[in-house]
Image: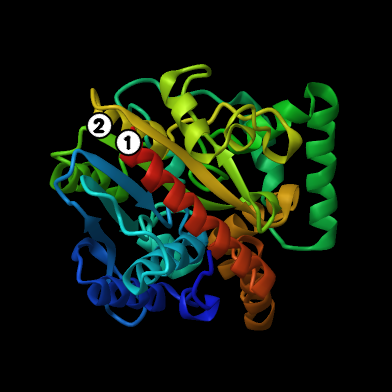
Amino acid sequence: MMPPDYWDCFAGSYVGARANFRNAARQAGVEWQSYAHPVELAADGSALSIDVAHLGDVRGARQLLVISGTHGLEGAAGSALQVAWMRSLREGAIAPIPPGVGVLLVHSFNPYGHEHGTRGTENNVDLNRNFVDHQAPYPDNPGYAALHAALIPEQWTQAAFAAIEDATREFEQSHGADALYNALTSGQYDHPDGLVYGGRAREWSNRMLERIVRDKLGSAEQVGFIDWHTGIGAYGEPFFLCFHPSGSAPERLAADWWGRERVLGQRPNGLARPDYQGLVFHGLQALLEPRPMVGAVVEFGTRGLGTRYALRLDQWLRHRARQQPNLERDAQLRADLADAFVPLSSVWRNSVLRHGMQITQQAVLGLSAW
């Protein structure tokens, strides 16, 4: 499978990515719609919106939902995959969508984060931890609470990094590497200026997903799902996080679609999978019930555990940098942050397009045979 040239698919900004997506949809002659943010705008004054394109049989019983930009900073990669797939479909470079199957592409699910180069929403909420029951007690994360004060320094200096490493090393020695990973990534609901903050209410994007499901998937009886992400795994290689119960029929189908070796028993960065809270994956399942869903979060690896540094940098730039402005420093730090999740390397980008298009096609074919 030969993907299009990566420079025609990847964009350097949210505005550019949105233009690419809408042009690809228009050229493919497909139904598309925008869900504009009611308050936030892009820097050029244009709308911040979630755009959707619906291909194939839009009223078919089998629908594949593909989301990009849940973590806004990662949106350029998922956007490029959606654009490349639409272009390849239009040009006949990949097999047509089978009868009775629709493919719903949701572009830039967190447009604020995509536009501003941050993983979180306008409220610093990690959208992929926001799909909890906000009327119930929030999940507790005592490990994160113990580390929070040490994780994001007042000043971004080598001395500050050493102090952070001391705190996390002490926690790891006392509780183990798996417990440290869980504390830092599973989600927390008490520190709005912290890492993986899940929020105290449904974010706008969360509510829009419910509307999109109602608007676009009303006729669906079976739904496939891909949520594109970056960070975990080997450089430029796909890493699957499938959250169906172990041994369940949906997990077996996911393994049939994408391969048992990819789907079953995965250990992110070689560690036990964290007890992730508030995932879009589970939120979508709840919105679709009782209709069945088969899906996965698909990551493309960048810096492995080195992304911990980038996650802290993201928060520091949001909450601390403006207190001590330095244009040259901050420009370099923002470039480093972007490269940590969407590397500029042609090797990485070509690998992402090649694997991502194959994964999409495997889901389309698997869904058609379900």
**Helix, strand or loop for disc 1:** helix
Kindly identify which residue carries mark 2.
288
Residue 267 visible in the shown view:
yes
Residue 316's image quarter? bottom right
Residue type beneath disc 2: Leu
Q: Mark 2 near mark 1, Cβ–Cβ under 8 Å? A: yes
Residue 345 visible in this rendered orientation of the protein: no
Q: CA distance from mark 2 to mark 1?
A: 6 Å
Tag 1: Cα neighbours inside 10 Å, few (<14), some, or many (≥20)?
A: some
Return the x and y of residue 34 as percentages of the image width and height.
20, 64
Q: Residues within 10 Å of mark 2 (few under 14, many from 20)?
A: many
Identify which residue is drawn at 79% across, 55% down. Answer: 160
Relative side of 126 to 122, left or right = right
Q: Which residue is mark 1?
A: 284
Whether 364 is drawn above or below 283: the answer is: below
Instruction: Give the amino acid type for the residue marked by disc 1 in the picture.
Output: Leu
Along the line of sight, the residue nearer the viewer: 287 or 257: 257
Q: Position of residue 115 (x, y in %)?
A: 42, 69
Q: Which mark is residue 267?
A: none
